[in-house]
Amino acid sequence: MQPGTLDGHVVGIHRARLVPGPWQPRRVFDPESLDELATSIRARGILSPLRVVPDPERGRYLIVAGERRWRAAALAGLAEVPCVVMSADIGSGALQELAILDNLHRANLRPGEEARAVAQLQQLGLILREMALRLGKSLGWVSQRLAIARLPEFALELLDDGSLTRQEALGLATFADEPDLIEACLEPDGRRLGQRLGGHVPETVGERVQAIRRVLELRRQRDDWAAGMRAPVIAS
């Protein structure tokens, strides 16, 4: 079988000839989840074929969608994996979009990975409504993920490992243009946050976000009042 000759057909390809492509939005593959999928594959096989593109120079195929199934197939001891061989002429942007959509549709990305993936779709040129339509999600769902994706990487990593909830991440996203405030909110001892708040530091991230918002609003009102006092009085 020569790479590229079975375009669009489902064929069995030896697992060793498959390698992950560069489009995968997932960063971590949970071992327990892979074991569960491997158990299912042993019982029922791979129900959804992988999507791959040929890499004829190296005599292999790059995985566009289905890396998790490929990894689980190895645990299950499968020698061959069912694949749909796509055209080698498909552009990199289209392949990246397909890889992202495949992962998002399967709904097993971690929340930070999910937010990054939606942001990547936006970078590929998709507008909000297009993303919602292709994902089968509401505009609000997409908007929330795009907001979370603006958080600095250290905050997204905390979200992915469960140290930060999605609601807390959304709250922090209101300070996306001020990463120092986000750092202060996430400090365990709250020392820098205490300096900003001028006193007591709430325990939870959500409460800290609300406290900062109140302080910022008071400062805005104070600045508006000061600006009004400095404004020249125009005689009637």
Image (cartoon, rainbow, N blue to C red):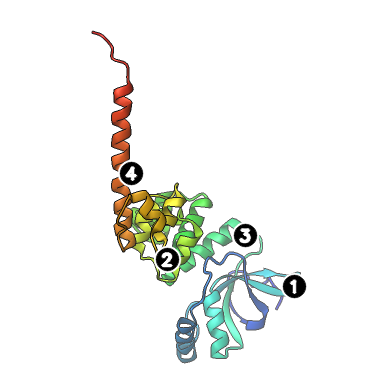
- Counting from the top left corner in percent of width and height, residue 123 is at 52, 51
For marks 1 and 3, the one nearer the N-term is 1
SS under mark 4: helix
Tell me if 24 is positioned left or right of 178 in this view: right
Mark closer to the observer (1, 3) = 1
- Name the amino acid, label 4: Leu
- Depth order, front residue of 212/109: 212
* CA–CA distance in space, label 2 to label 4: 25 Å
Q: For the residue carrying disc 4, how many other residues have a C-alpha within 10 Å: few (<14), some (14-19), or many (20+)?
A: some
- Dot 2 corresponds to which residue? 159
- Name the amino acid, label 1: Arg
For marks 4 and 1, the one nearer the N-term is 1
Q: Residue at x 42, y 51 (%)?
A: 181
In the image, is residue 178 above or below residue 189? Answer: above
**Residue 58: image tag:** 1
For marks 2 and 1, the one nearer the N-term is 1
Q: For the residue carrying disc 1, how many other residues have a C-alpha within 10 Å: few (<14), some (14-19), or many (20+)?
A: few
For marks 2 and 4, the one nearer the N-term is 2
Tell me if 23 is positioned left or right of 228 in this view: right
* CA–CA distance in space, label 2 to label 3: 34 Å
- Depth order, front residue of 193/20: 193
